[in-house]
Amino acid sequence: MKKLLLVVLLAAGLTSCNEQKTAYVDTSKLIQEYKEMKEVEAEFTAKSDSIKGELDTMAQDFQREVEDYQSNMNSMSVDKRKEVEQTLMRKQQMIQQQQQMRGNQLREESDTVIDSIVSKVKGYVKDYGKDNGYTYIFGSNESANIMYAKDGLDITEEILEKLNAEYKK
């Protein structure tokens, strides 16, 4: 009986020594406040504005051509009207294709860069966890993966500071 009690106490002692270190990171905040992400967002906003400006200029030029046609169409022959209308329809289709193509291109480029940054941040958190002896680092976001955590377990600011400091280098 004494042996059994000793074994139980020894087993309990060994398992209590194996304490797991856990924390969590607010993933939304981490990504949004990461300096590289902010720079990338600013870069893509500028690119988007530039493309929008070019496309708006094309659309305005096209609108002027349509207005010019409408004001002069009564003085044109039927054949000339059909010719101008076909030309205008081709230009309108070209503008729409340009808008779609440029938008898709910018979106794909943005998605690729953002995916790369997210992977980089995940890798950093993984390395941080290993280097600091964490068993688990959970991610929390708007979906509320973590509904409650003891004070002191949120390491978002700590990781964000170190991640931004590393990015400055």
Image (tube, rainbow, N blue to C red):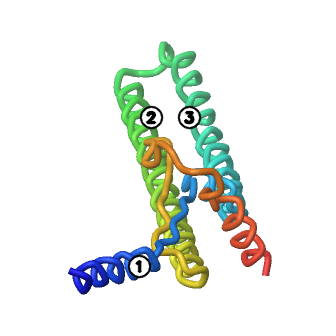
The 10 Å Cα crowd at callout 2, few under 14, some 14 to 19, many 20 or more, is some
Q: In this view, does 167 lie above or below 43?
A: below
Q: Which of marks 1 and 2 is in front?
A: 1
| Residue 127 sits in quarter | bottom right
Q: Residues within 10 Å of mark 1 (few under 14, many from 20)?
A: few
Q: Is mark 2 on a helix, strand or loop?
A: helix
| Earlier sequence position, callout 2 versus callout 3 | 3
Question: x%, y% of residue 160?
Answer: 69, 64
Residue where numbered disc 3 is placed? 62
Instruction: Give the percent coordinates (x, y) of residue 20.
Output: 47, 72
Q: Which of marks 1 and 3 is nearer the N terminus?
A: 1
Above-or-below relation of 5 to 113: below
Amino acid type indicated by mark 1: Gly
- CB atoms of marks 2 and 3 within 8 Å: yes
* Towards the viewer: 42 or 47: 42
Disc nearest the viewer among 1 and 3: 1
Badge count: 3
**Residue 37: x percent and y percent?**
65, 61
Q: Residue at x 59, y 44 (%)?
A: 55
Count neighbours of disc 3 (C-alpha within 10 A) and say few if under 14, some if 14 to 19, many if 20 or more.
some
Question: Which element is circle 1 on?
Answer: helix
Task: Identify the residue position indicated by label 1 in the image.
Answer: 13
Of the image marks 1 and 2, the number of the one nearer the N terminus: 1
| Residue marked by disc 2 | 88
